[in-house]
Amino acid sequence: MTRVWGEDAAALVAAGADAAALAALEDGLLDGFALPAGPRWDAHTHLGRDADGHALDTAGLVADMDRWGVAGAVAFPANEPGDDGSFTVANDAVLAAAAAHPGRIVPVCRADPRAGWAAAVDRAAAGGARGLKLHPVAQGFAPESPECVACVAAATALGWPVLFHAGFGARRLAGPFRDLAAAVPGARLILAHGARGDARAVREAFAGHPGVWFDTSLAALPDLVELPPGRLVWGSDRPYGEHGTALQLVALAARVAGWSPSEVAGVLGGNLLALLGEPA
């Protein structure tokens, strides 16, 4: 056993954890989810080293996916914008990871709407990127700002979904994202973390809206059970979260909310594959 809960097992043992107990717990959860058959696709993973020290390399991501039966994962850079803020080096690294693991890693580029985003998006698109990740908190911009609207419009013109950080330090979300969706009517927005922190207002603002989805990564269980499963995509937020508890969260939400097996299968992979234009 080299990794447990997506983390280095030796480091956990050195900190006082019992290796055998950790492995048994992980194995028990893996066997006890009672999740339906079907592909598991992770909508939210980072590659690289974040400014806060969290890190995940391609080999580590693929090992995690293999351990938890994850068929594929959307990957985008950690918060590594580079000196010019363009994320060029980090985006290129994600594209290289996807090229090394075709069909398993879906590359999504990251940009800062205030720092050379147009060139970053063009470069990533030419390299095979399939979507855009924006982080209003880390990059310090407002979702409804003119520069963000322009960036989302460009991604939408490419046919890309746009995944936004939505929670954990974000300000009120419902109004800004409602304004953004109105400004780019064809946008397909994925709000990460179940819009944690302003989830109720966001649910009310986008009830029945055809262009908004939510990822489950590090979301709150009460928020997920209030959202329609057809608008949810499963995510882990590796390396901040990990696949075991991310799967457990969906299993619990399914039981509490009474989702059907087909609805759970959609959350775990079918909904994301449809967003990406991939066959289920």
Image (cartoon, rainbow, N blue to C red):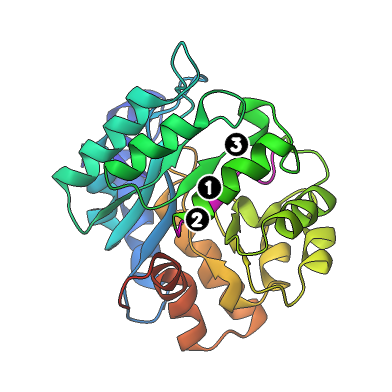
Q: Quadrant of residue 73?
A: bottom left
Left or right of 236 in this view: 167: right
Number of other residues with Cα within 10 Å of mark 1, as a class: few under 14, some 14 to 19, many 20 or more: some
Q: CA distance from mark 1 to mark 2?
A: 5 Å
Residue 261 among those drawn in magenta: no
Residue type pointed to by label 1? Ala
Residue 248: x percent and y percent?
A: 49, 63
- Which residue is found at the position 53% from the left and 47% from the top? 154
Residue 195: x percent and y percent?
A: 70, 53
Q: Which residues are magenta?
A: 159-168
Prevailing secondary structure class for the magenta stretch in the rendered image: loop
Please give the residue where the numbered disc 2 appears in the rendered image.
Answer: 157
Residue 153 sits above or below residue 248 on the image: above
Nearer the N terminus, badge 1 or badge 3?
Answer: 3
SS assignment at label 1: helix
Residue type pointed to by label 3? His
Do the numbered discs 1 and 2 sit on residues whose CB atoms are within 8 Å?
yes
Residue 135, numbered circle:
3
Residue type pointed to by label 2? Ala
Residue 162 among those drawn in magenta: yes
In this rendered view, identify the residue nearer to me: 182 or 141.
Answer: 182
Q: Please identify, in this view, whether the residue under mark 1 or under mark 3 is nearer the observer.
A: 1
- Which residue is found at the position 17% from the left and 49% from the top? 101
- Which residue is found at the position 21% from the left and 37% from the top? 96
Number of other residues with Cα within 10 Å of mark 2, as a class: few under 14, some 14 to 19, many 20 or more: few
Residue 124: x percent and y percent?
A: 35, 39
Q: Is residue 2 visible?
A: no
Left or right of 262 in this view: 254: right
In this rendered view, identify the residue nearer to me: 71 or 276.
Answer: 276
Residue 266: x percent and y percent?
A: 46, 77
In this rendered view, identify the residue nearer to me: 168 or 161.
Answer: 161
Please give the residue where the numbered disc 1 appears in the rendered image.
Answer: 154
